[in-house]
Image (cartoon, grey):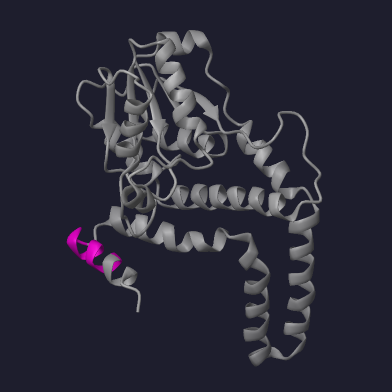
Amino acid sequence: MSSLPWKMIIELRDNGFNSKVMFYFLSKTIGIISEPLLHPFLILFTGLMCSLFFGRRFFTISCYFALVVACSYIFLPFGSIALRQLENATPLATDNQISDARAIIILGGFTNNSLIAQERNQISVGSSAERIIIGLAKHKAWPDKKLIISGYSGKLNKTGWSVAFISKMIITSLQHPLDNVFFEYESRNTYQNAVNISKMPNLDISDPMILITSASHMFRTKKIFEKLGFSNLSFYSVDYQTPFTQEKWLFSPEENISYLRVVFHEWLGLLAYKLSGRI
């Protein structure tokens, strides 16, 4: 039997079941419903349960509805349309804004499986590697700025190296100076990123700063940081997956599902943060 549930229960116990830990735990578990591949099965299951009490016609209706949902997800560009709206929602910081900033913030989420990285003793980056690549490029162009890299792990079962630790390995291997680079090792979601960065010494949240994260993630990130009092932030989105002015109409089930996965994750995150008063 997997030890994962017990590890999560122990973590909740050790943190006193406080609201922040409970929010993190619930957001990660409820987030399972953002997986589009599950939606037709959830519809079928709901129809089956309803048919037990209200008659077989409910299951028949659910079968048709599940088929329509599955075909829509696969063949229609709903995902790319919605994702483009998310990616275009936040204006890109200008060079003048970067020049005026006191710090550049890079949010984690660009590493691959941290346990594999630790056990293989190798750097491992994922599909959002543009965050660290472009972030380091901006810091190289403006080395007088503080570079802040924030994150431990977004997984429920936190194992392996932190995002910040892997980032330090990347920076060292590229021979990028560490003199003005600062790491935040504890954050496990975007809200914790903002809270922990706000507590870092020699940093005023009213200072002009540049924040770098994936374009799809930037709208929610902007809302969270501004809610916590970061009043002079500019935003540099990276890791775009859609063009600026037109949707991609593709017969590509893999890409369509991938876009929807990102969109549903962000929509659910926005809803959860709104209901909890974090944005």
- Magenta span has 15? yes
User: At 36% across and 58% down in the image, what residue appears?
Assistant: 156
* Location of residue 50 in the rendering, given as x and y in whole percent from the top left corner: 65, 84
* Location of residue 200 in the rendering, given as x and y in whole percent from the top left corner: 23, 29
- The answer to whether residue 165 is left or right of residue 249 is left
Q: Quadrant of the N terminus?
A: bottom left
User: At 73% across and 77% down in the image, what residue appears?
Assistant: 62
Dominant secondary structure, magenta: helix
* Location of residue 236 in the rendering, given as x and y in whole percent from the top left corner: 51, 24
Q: Quadrant of residue 226?
A: top left
User: At 24% across and 62% down in the image, what residue appears?
Assistant: 11
Nearer the observer, 173 or 77? 173
Nearer the observer, 155 or 14? 155
- The answer to whether residue 108 is left or right of residue 34 is left
Considering only vertical position in the picture, is 177 above or below 223?
above
User: At 78% across and 40% down in the image, what residue appears?
Assistant: 248
* Location of residue 23 in the rendering, given as x and y in whole percent from the top left corner: 35, 56
- The answer to whether residue 183 is left or right of residue 230 is left
- The answer to whether residue 186 is left or right of residue 42 is left
Count the marks: how many? 0
Q: Quadrant of residue 110?
A: top left
Considering only vertical position in the picture, is 181 above or below 56?
above
- The stretch in magenta equals 8-16
Nearer the observer, 150 or 34? 150
Q: Quadrant of the C terminus?
A: top left
